[in-house]
Amino acid sequence: MPASIRDVAQLAGVSVGTVSNVLNRPDEVAVDTVAKVNAAIEQLAYVRNDAARRLRAGVSRTVGFVVLDGQNPFFNDVVRGAEDEAFRNGIALLHGNTDEDISRERMYLELFEEQQVRGVLIAPHGDVASQLQRLRSRGIPSVLIDRFSGDGRFSSVSVDSLAGGRMAAEHLIGIGRRRIAVVGGPFDLRQMNDRLAGARIAVDEADEDVELEIIATEAMTVTEGARAGERILERPRRDRPDAVFAGNDLLALGLMQSLVVSGRSLVPEQIALIGFDDIPFAAAAAVPLTSLRQPSRIIGRTALRILLEESSDPDAIPRQTVFQPELVVRASA
């Protein structure tokens, strides 16, 4: 059985409080007493329970991260950025994937509350304001990831999806496309709604006649993108869009799988294709994918820094950090 702090105190002939002072504030203890306690620690091979000590002090060394879609490389990179920053600060990052499921999202938030983590990063699916407010009342701050905090109650780190959607549609219009489809969903995802709204602005402001249609998907996955591609290919060629803006790169890669790999349509000759996120697979696609790049690791690092600042200062004013996407043009559009 591992030695306890009481064992150390007994062997050194001092009180438990003195041992605690030697471990935490040795400069306040007499030199000879420090020497006796350290000798006892060495003889007993005592290892203090640092986690319990910090929990009693009210300072946890763990941060929770609730991830919207663990299969999306974009979120994996965001987690990596937060993890790198956490490591630099001696913090462990615990993360759970909700898979866009509200019940799983709620479960992870409750779990992190029970664990009394130092703070929570969350890429939310549903409305989590009441749960985050509960966490705050217990001294656990939170930062929204990939979601702008519209009411400013919580700090957030996001990318301007409205601007990204506008940039995508403007690029497609600029290369001569006039029948643009926006593929994505579900549209209760704020990011997807913003990307669609941005595309609509570009179409409304276009000098020439441009059509915009929505092809809804049940999720932002490769499988759903492939299904959307099949639905497009079921139409006569004259009724197909000549450009597609996909809500993320996974959808775009699924679309490319249907359109190109099947050999029934050419990208970009017949259908130009743009994604969003610029995940590593985008450049390696069958036809290198044009995409809106998000600074994923920077998002994670920035969010973790803000969270640690707020955990140290409960009166910190929430801040909204918004990065601008970058259009990366490749062969698909």
Image: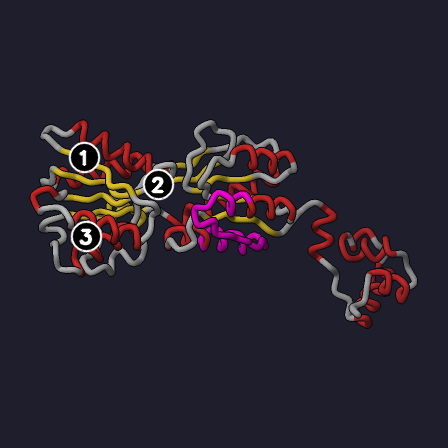
- Type of residue at label 3? Arg
Q: Quadrant of residue 30?
A: bottom right
Name the residue carrying label 1: 212
Q: Position of residue 177 (x, y in %)?
A: 11, 40
Q: Nearer the viewer's eye, disc 1 or disc 2?
A: 2
Q: Position of residue 72 (x, y in %)?
A: 37, 53
State whether residue 18 is above or below residue 118. below
Image quarter hosting the N terminus? bottom right
- Type of residue at label 1? Leu
Q: Which residues are magenta?
A: 80-106
Residue placed most toward the observer, 254 or 324: 254
Which residue is located at x 38 percent, y 39 percent? 189
- Type of residue at label 2? Pro
State whether residue 26 is above or below residue 237. below
N-terminal label among 2 and 3: 2
Name the residue carrying label 2: 186
N-terminal label among 3 and 1: 1
Q: Nearer the viewer's eye, disc 3 or disc 1?
A: 1
Q: Is residue 326 visible?
A: no
* C-alpha gap between disc 2 and disc 3: 27 Å
Q: Which mark is residue 86?
A: none
Name the residue carrying label 3: 330
Which residue is located at x 9 percent, y 30 percent? 208
Describe the element under mark 3 as helix, strand or loop: loop
**Neighbours of disc 3 within 10 Å: few (<14), some (14-19), many (20+):** some
* C-alpha gap between disc 1 and disc 2: 18 Å
Whether pointer 2 and pointer 3 mark residues with C-beta atoms closer than 8 Å, the reply is no
